[in-house]
């Protein structure tokens, strides 16, 4: 049977068919759906871990205990999990271990554009790169086998266009596998220096074997057509190249991107007059070729930034451009915005109104940096809001009462807790606002340890944010409802004024959650509306000016009442 | 067969993912090689959203570039104008007449262009516009405007109706099925 499947769904199918027993991941676009689809198979245990490091260590444990295991994450998630990655490379595996990392060229939903192949090279862990959904399924299944054969985890790298594109996949049955019996083997699994030194020798020997494997493996394929142009490529870039250049050139498609073959590339280059390397983001394949003394053309044409496409390749290699017609006048941009009824909206308005410096974090609320709220001052990575606030307050305590950190519930659990411990332990009078919308929002509503539910939708232990903050030494913890804008503002200003570290939990479930009951849409009384545009200052997508008066779009409005609180003329009501 | 390209554009939350999945399943059932490319995450939050459906004997790239789309289906007028450059010469532009102000228009930093459909036609696009929102309300829910437009696109493509309804059944939850099938009918009958 053939089914149209997202790359991520096909990946999950590969995990299922390959006999995977455990999935532990942290959500992150564009990797999230692998784990969501994986959780639909009853034969596989699947969970959301608090962060990627925990997820990878859980999967490592399952592998040591003899099962095939998986963890998935986005590119920046692999930075969080880099610590276990670099050492599991030394210990190797018992049951097959597959790691998914999804890069986001073009930054559709990310804070940077890093190329995860660097992690594979640096950790000396082999990496595969599928180019469509069918390959996702196939590569994952083979990766489990190879992981056990070469005694090493396998990373499978996706990019947004592979993860989030659907193509046809043929479904096969699951191969059920018994646990590989556990045997104590400390010299392999207990990485103290004496044992690790011996394991490093194993790692280097393994890399040689993997290079040998890469020379003839099923993942690396040549297609000889015209010998005047040869293209070395991998992943989604292969699909772009194939569409742009068709059968007019020869291809070396590298499905295994670490380690890279030597002789295979040499032979291919020798058979072609001119060789292009087409790869997204960094110049990994190109540098490898140049190190081998092979003359290739790559980044000088394609650059390091953003996504490639068939149009870019057709233009750069063939000088071919497609004609098109632009609209005849400027089209206003439509940036993403906080949804109508977003519980974060009023809070950011209050922070901006009071000229408060906001140390931000990763999640939907990063949209608080956009116009008209323009509230957030800095965003670096998961958890950094709190630690960066501490650093700011240490060197410039004069502004302590004018600065806050904002962090979501899931992000706080991910890596905000240790940052808050630093505030408590190393003592700054910092004010931290936890934006508790009771879900992991940006990635599309995943459960987390504060929601009381697990990935399968079953009841789970609910971590109390209040008790957790108190337990790590924050004595001032207050809870507010952000739909009550005046009260929320008052509490935040009070906590900023206090000479002590404090946490304000702004608690209101995401308006898009299915169980959240919406109030009727609000209406503008056009007789009372003075066209002052005060209600537009909160940047609600449901409110605009029509015929000189404020107007609320009823299909979007959920009746949150923030605009009503903004209006000085009582013009907004039910 | 040469690869054909359909682009679905709109505002995050308007249901472009569902629309692309329905079309994708119709094409798969007709024996084509199909690729559907979606956008998840940040851009879904009320931003300009685009999905691609491509089909033919063999499809390579899942994305559509400027000047490549045989059909653009737009849920919102400004988005139809924004993505016009992706339309192939002689391609069809199917658009809902719904207008949603983007944030720069709401804040007064930019103006929403007037008479967009006329201007699109003047630029040579084969424009088919419809008040999908009202028809969706007539079917029972404003959110079904995506399936109204599916009905309209079905009338421009040569596949039997039962293929479309089967794909809708496959992609829509049971309790919303009746209303979506009604929305499809209303869209299909737009003249």
Image (cartoon, helix red, strand yellow):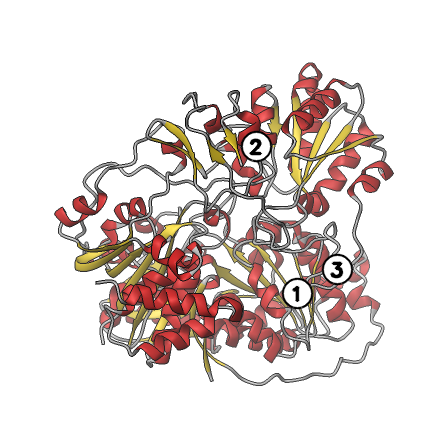
**Are the residues under marks 2 and 3 on the same chain?**
yes
Q: Quadrant of residue A471?
A: top right
Q: Residue furthest top?
A: A398
**Residue A288 is at least partly visible in this image:** no
Q: Contact, CB < 8 Å: mark 2 with mark 1?
A: no
Q: Position of residue A276 (x, y in %)?
A: 31, 60
**Which of A70 and A469 lies nearest the eye of the viewer?**
A469
Q: Position of residue A220 (x, y in %)?
A: 44, 73
Please tell me how crowded label 2 is: few (under 14), some (14-19), or many (20+) other residues with Cα within 10 Å: many
Secondary element type, mark 2:
helix
Q: Position of residue B181 (x, y in %)?
A: 40, 69
Secondary element type, mark 1:
helix
Secondary element type, mark 3:
helix
Instruction: Report the side of B11 relative to A428 (left or right).
Output: left
Residue at image point 45% right, 39% down: A542
A377 lies above or below A259: above
Residue where numbered disc 2 is placed: A562
**Which of A185 and B94 lies nearest the eye of the viewer?**
B94
The chain identifier of the residue carrying mark 1 reads A
Residue where numbered disc 3 is placed: A197
Looking at the rendered structure, which numbered label has been put on residue A203? Answer: 1
Structural distance between the alpha carbons of marks 1 and 3 = 10 Å
**Are the residues under marks 2 and 1 on the same chain?**
yes
**Residue A550 is at least partly visible in this image:** yes
């Amino acid at each position: 049977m053939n089914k149209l499947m997202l790359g991520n769904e096909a990946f999950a199918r590969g995990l299922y068919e390959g006999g995977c027993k455990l999935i532990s991941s942290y959500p992150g676009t564009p990797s999230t759906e692998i784990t969501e689809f994986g959780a639909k198979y009853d034969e596989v245990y699947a969970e959301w871990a608090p962060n990627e490091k925990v997820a990878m260590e859980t999967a490592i444990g399952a592998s040591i205990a003899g099962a095939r295991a998986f963890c998935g994450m986005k590119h920046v998630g692999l930075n969080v999990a880099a610590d276990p990655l670099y050492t599991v490379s030394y210990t190797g595996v018992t049951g097959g271990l597959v790691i998914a990392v999804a890069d986001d060229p073009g930054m559709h939903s990310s804070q940077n554009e890093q190329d995860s192949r660097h992690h594979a090279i640096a950790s000396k862990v082999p990496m595969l790169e599928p180019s469509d959904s069918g390959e996702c399924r196939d590569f994952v299944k083979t990766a489990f086998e190879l992981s056990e054969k070469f005694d090493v985890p396998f990373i499978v790298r996706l990019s947004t266009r592979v993860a989030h594109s659907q193509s046809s996949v043929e479904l096969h049955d699951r191969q059920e596998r018994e646990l590989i019996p556990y045997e104590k083997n400390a010299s392999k699994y207990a990485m103290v220096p004496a044992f690790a030194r011996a394991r490093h020798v194993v790692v280097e020997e393994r890399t040689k074997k993997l290079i040998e494997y890469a020379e003839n493996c099923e993942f690396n394929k040549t297609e000889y057509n015209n010998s005047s142009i040869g293209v070395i490529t991998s992943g989604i870039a292969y699909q772009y190249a194939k569409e742009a250049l068709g059968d007019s050139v020869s291809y070396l498609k590298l499905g295994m991107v670490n380690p890279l073959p030597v002789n295979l590339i040499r032979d291919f280059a020798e058979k072609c007059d001119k060789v292009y390397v087409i790869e997204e983001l960094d110049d990994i394949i190109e540098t490898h070729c140049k190190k081998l003394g092979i003359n290739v053309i790559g980044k000088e044409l394609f650059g390091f930034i953003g996504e490639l496409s068939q149009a870019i390749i057709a233009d750069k290699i063939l000088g071919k451009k497609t004609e098109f017609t632009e609209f005849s006048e400027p089209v206003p941009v439509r940036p993403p915005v906080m949804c109508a009824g977003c519980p974060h909206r009023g809070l950011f308005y209050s922070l901006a109104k009071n000229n408060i410096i906001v140390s931000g974090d990763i999640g939907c609320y990063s949209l608080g940096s956009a116009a008209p709220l323009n509230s957030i001052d800095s965003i670096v990575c998961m958890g950094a809001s709190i630690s960066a606030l501490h650093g700011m307050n240490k060197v410039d305590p004069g502004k302590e009462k004018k600065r806050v950190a904002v962090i979501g519930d899931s992000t706080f659990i991910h890596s905000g807790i240790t940052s808050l411990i630093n505030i408590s332990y190393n003592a700054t009078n910092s004010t931290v606002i936890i934006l508790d919308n009771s879900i992991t929002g940006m990635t599309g509503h995943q459960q987390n340890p504060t929601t009381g539910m697990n990935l399968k939708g079953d009841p789970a232990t609910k971590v109390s944010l209040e008790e957790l903050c108190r337990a790590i030494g924050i004595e001032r913890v207050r809870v507010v409802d952000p739909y009550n804008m005046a009260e929320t503002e008052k509490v935040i200003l009070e906590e900023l004024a206090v000479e002590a570290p404090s946490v304000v939990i702004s608690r209101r479930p995401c308006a898009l959650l299915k169980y959240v009951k919406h109030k009727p849409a609000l209406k503008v009384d056009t007789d009372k509306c003075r066209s002052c545009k005060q209600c537009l200052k909160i940047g609600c997508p449901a409110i605009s000016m029509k015929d000189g008066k404020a107007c609320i779009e009823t299909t979007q409005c959920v009746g949150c009442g923030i605009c009503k609180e903004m209006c000085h003329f009582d013009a907004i009501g039910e | 067969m040469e690869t054909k390209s359909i682009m679905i554009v709109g505002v995050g939350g308007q249901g472009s993912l569902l629309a692309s999945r329905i079309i994708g399943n119709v094409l798969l059932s007709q024996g084509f090689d199909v690729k559907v490319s979606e956008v998840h995450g940040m851009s879904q939050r009320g931003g300009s959203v685009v999905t691609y459906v491509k089909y033919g004997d063999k499809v390579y790239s899942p994305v559509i570039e400027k000047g490549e789309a045989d059909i653009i289906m737009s849920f919102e007028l400004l988005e139809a104008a924004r993505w016009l450059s992706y339309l192939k010469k002689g391609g069809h532009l199917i658009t809902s007449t719904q207008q949603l102000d983007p944030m720069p228009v709401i804040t007064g930093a930019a103006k929403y262009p007037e008479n967009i459909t006329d201007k699109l036609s003047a630029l040579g696009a084969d424009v088919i516009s419809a008040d999908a929102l009202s028809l969706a309300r007539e079917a029972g829910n404003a959110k079904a405007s995506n399936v109204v437009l599916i009905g309209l696109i079905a009338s421009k493509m040569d596949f039997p109706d039962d293929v479309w309804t089967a794909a809708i059944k496959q992609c829509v939850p049971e309790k919303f099925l009746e209303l979506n099938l009604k929305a499809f009918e209303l869209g299909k009958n737009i003249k």
